[in-house]
Image (cartoon, grey):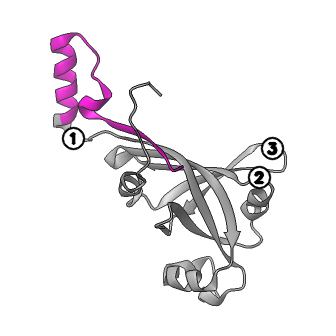
Amino acid sequence: MSDQTPVTHDLSKLFEKIKDVRIAMLTTTDEQHQLHSRPMYTLKPEHDGSLLFFTDADSAKVFEVRRDDSVNLSYSNPKDNVYASVTGTAEVNQDKAKIAELWSEDMRAWFPKGKDDPSIRILKITIYKAEYWDSPSSILSRAYAYARAVATGEKSKDDDVNQHAQVKAR
C-alpha cells in the first residue's frame, strides 16, 4: 500500500462497495495452523460495523474461530472491477431473534428445518480493517488512462481511474 492510499474510519463506503457481492471467501486458521478458506453468503452488514453469516454449529469454521478468532474475508466482483479484503475477529452465537430476523427461505437448502433448526449459528465478523479497490470497467475509463499514459509518458495514478482506500474500524 502506498503512503498516498486514503485511510478512513467510515465503513459505509466499504459496505456500499460489497453490497452486491453476496459471496465472500472466509479465511480462518485450521488445526495445523494453515490457512483455510471457503465461500460464505453475506447476510448483511450491521450498524456496529460487523458482517453476519449463517453457519452450522458443527462446521470446521466454528471450531477454528473459537481457537483463533482472527479471520479475513475477500470479496470479488470482476464484472464491476470491485475487490475488497476485510480483516477482523469472528465470534459465533445463537441469537434466535437475530436468526429469525435474517432468515430467508433460500437458507433452507443448508438448514432444512428452517429458522428453528438447532444447528444454525450466526458467525459475526467484527471488522478491524479493510481495503477496497474499485476501478471503472468502462472502455472510456480505460481509454482515458491509456491516452493519459501515452500523452504524458507517465503511468496513470490510481486516483485517475481507480478508487483504493483503507478503512480502519477502530
Looking at the rendering, the stretch of residues picked out in magenta corresponds to: 141-170
Residue type at tag 2: Asp
Residue occupied by mark 1: 138
* Magenta-span inclusion, residue 165: yes
Nearer the observer, 169 or 116: 169
From the top left corner, tell me how far across and down residue 116 is, in percent: 64, 89
Residue under the point 72% across and 54% down: 69
Q: Is residue 60 left or right of residue 52?
A: right
Residue 150 appearing in the image: yes
Task: Where is residue 80? Give x, y as percent.
Answer: 32, 48
Q: Which residue is mark 2?
A: 68
Q: CA distance from mark 1 to mark 2?
A: 41 Å
Secondary structure state at the residue bearing disc 1: loop
Q: Residue at x 77, y 57 (%)?
A: 64
Residue mark closest to the camera, 1 vs 2: 2
**Residue density around tag 3, few if under 14, some if 14–19, many if 20 or more, within 10 Å:** few
Circle 2 packing at 10 Å, graded few (<14), some (14-19), many (20+), is some
